[in-house]
Image: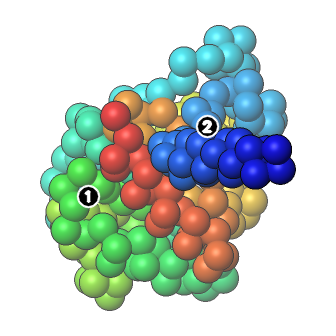
Amino acid sequence: MKRIVFLVIFSFTCIFLIYFFNQPEKVKTLPVINPVDVNEEMVDPELLRIGYGHKIGTFSFLDQNNKQFTDKAINGKVVVAEYFFTTCGTICPKMNVQMQRVHKAFQKDRRFSILSFTVDPANDTPEQLKKYADSHDASDNTWHFLTGKKEDLYALARKSFFVLKPAEALNQGDVGSDFIHTNNFVLVDKSRRIRGYYDGTSENEVDQLIKDIGLLLEEK
């Protein structure tokens, strides 16, 4: 009798282990971030009313090679976006050291792009951005430094990437200090949806960003 009980228990244990170890590994998925998921202060009221289905909007700027760069260039690509300015001496250098790591990891992958928008277009001309890009060994095919009209740059930050408070966007006289020092890297998927925010001064968070970029590149 004991032998039979032992064999039954052993059999069920074996079946359980076979079942457990043959389960498909669950693939991590990243959340889709919509206006309702972001601090209301960062969202244009019209978008807040819509709430869901948010995608990065249209834009047209000049890149570091003085060529037009539009939102069409990111269709079907995974994107990391940041806002900075070339003469920043505080967090921007730290951020772009980390962005260099992201660039190095994916610079040969044509499914990926980095967008670095200036918040100081009066000084950050295409020529200035080109010098900055070269100093960071930026590949023209992957890392795009963008400038244009200040109101357009700020509107995109507020209405698409949610990294600028509306009150700061209205202050067009000077570059607002709070906005200049935003440390967010914004991760965008192939469908132009926001999938994450990361502290661009944190090595650990950028480690996670690199992993999450890999997830989105393989996401169906």
Residue 55 on image: x %, y %: 47, 27
Q: Give the residue number, with chain letter if any, for mark 1.
A: 63
Q: Residues within 10 Å of mark 1 (few under 14, many from 20)?
A: many
Q: Which of marks 2 and 1 is in front?
A: 2
Q: Residues within 10 Å of mark 2 (few under 14, many from 20)?
A: few
Q: Mark number for residue 31?
A: 2
Task: Name the residue at 29% across, 55% down.
Answer: 112
Does the image show residue 105? yes
Q: Which amino acid does label 1 sit on?
A: Asp
Q: In this view, does 184 lie above or below 140?
A: above
Residue 188 on image: x %, y %: 46, 44
- In front of the other: 159 or 30: 30
Q: Are marks 2 and 1 in contact (CB under 8 Å)?
A: no
Task: Name the residue at 73% across, 24% down.
Answer: 36
Left or right of 190 on screen, residue 117:
right
Q: Is residue 56 above or below residue 153?
A: above
- In front of the other: 143 or 173: 143
Q: In which quarter of the image is the C terminus?
A: top left
The Cα–Cα distance between marks 2 and 1, rounded to whole angstroms, is 30 Å
Q: Which amino acid does label 2 sit on?
A: Pro
